[in-house]
Amino acid sequence: MTTVLVDLLPLIIGAALLPVWIIITLLLLRSEGGLWKALAFVGGSTLVKLAQGLLFGMVFDTAYKSNDYYTDTNPIAATLQLIVGILMMITAIKKWNKEDDPDAPPPRWMTMFSGVSVVQTLGIGVLLTIVAIKQWVFTLSALSIITQALLTQTEGALTFVIYVLASQSLLLAPIIISAIAPTRSASLLDTAQTWLERHNRVLMIAASSIFGIWFLWKGITGLIN
């Protein structure tokens, strides 16, 4: 199980390093009733990932068993990693050319977060996760790696839950800080939001390029071997 978590680490980091999602969480925290709105937003996203895990985990498990696919190589995981690499390199190029990220919400959405309700933020979290192509590929890649590891059902489920929570860690961190120290955290969260908004493009180019190259290499070598 520990080995699988190590294999999942690049996917966890890639799924977590999404500045726009962190900015949305910080915007919600600054609004009235922000703690509950931010929790609903992250909760909606988490529910979708868990549902994806339940559905596609069974699909992958059935596919592997029906094809006696218990080998050291995993072309499904390798193909998904290759797709992740391609998508991340496309993101890096788009950011370099100052184009919009297709997985980011429309700009007008960013101005309406302060006025939405808890139920609406839950729905937004669900919707954005459903339409985020890179998040789909990250999740499916994680499921493929977990299935290939031949863990017990309990170990597999626990590993996927750990993956989901870890991939949401940069969204959960400001929520936890805000809940523990609401007054003290206000200035810290404001500073974090300003910094992320200012350096969003550079962060996305750097992270997408580094992880894009890594996933491309991982996918290509996995398919060749």
Image (spheres, rainbow, N blue to C red):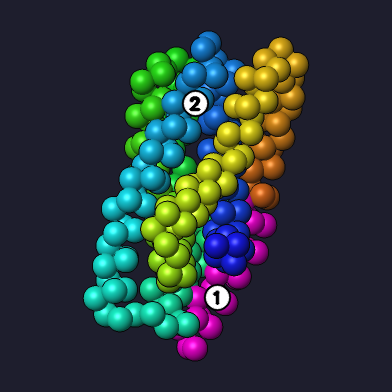
Say whether residue 19 is left or right of residue 109: right
Task: Judge whether 208 appears above or below 70 on screen.
Answer: above
Quadrant of the rendered image containing residue 199: top right
Q: In this rendering, does residue 120 appear at all? A: yes
Q: Which residues are magenta?
A: 204-225
**Could you say which is closer to the camera, residue 4 or residue 133?**
4
Percent coordinates x, y for residue 185 in the rendering? 72, 20
Percent coordinates x, y for residue 97 in the rendering? 57, 55
* Residue 207 on the magenta segment: yes
Q: In this rendering, does residue 89 appear at all? A: no
Residue pointed to by mark 2: 39
Label 2: which secondary element: helix
Residue type of the residue flagged with mark 1: Lys
**Residue 218 numbered mark, or none:** 1
Task: Judge whether 105 appears above or below 158 on screen.
Answer: above
Residue type of the residue flagged with mark 2: Leu
The dominant secondary structure in magenta is: helix
Q: Identify the residue at image location x=42%, y=54%.
A: 154
Q: Label 1 neighbourhood size at 10 Å, few (<14), some (14-19), many (20+)?
A: some
Q: Identify the residue at image location x=45%, y=75%.
A: 78
Q: Identify the residue at image location x=37%, y=52%.
A: 53
Label 1: which secondary element: helix
Percent coordinates x, y for residue 51 in the rendering? 33, 45
Quadrant of the rendered image containing residue 2: bottom right
Say whether residue 16 is left or right of residue 112: right
**Could you say which is closer to the camera, residue 217 or residue 202?**
217
**Residue 28 numbered mark, or none:** none
**Could you say which is closer to the camera, residue 180 or residue 198?**
180
Percent coordinates x, y for residue 1 in the rendering? 55, 62
Q: Label 2 neighbourhood size at 10 Å, few (<14), some (14-19), many (20+)?
A: many
Q: How many angstroms separate mark 2 from mark 1 (CA)?
A: 34 Å
| Foreground disc of the pair 2, 1 | 2
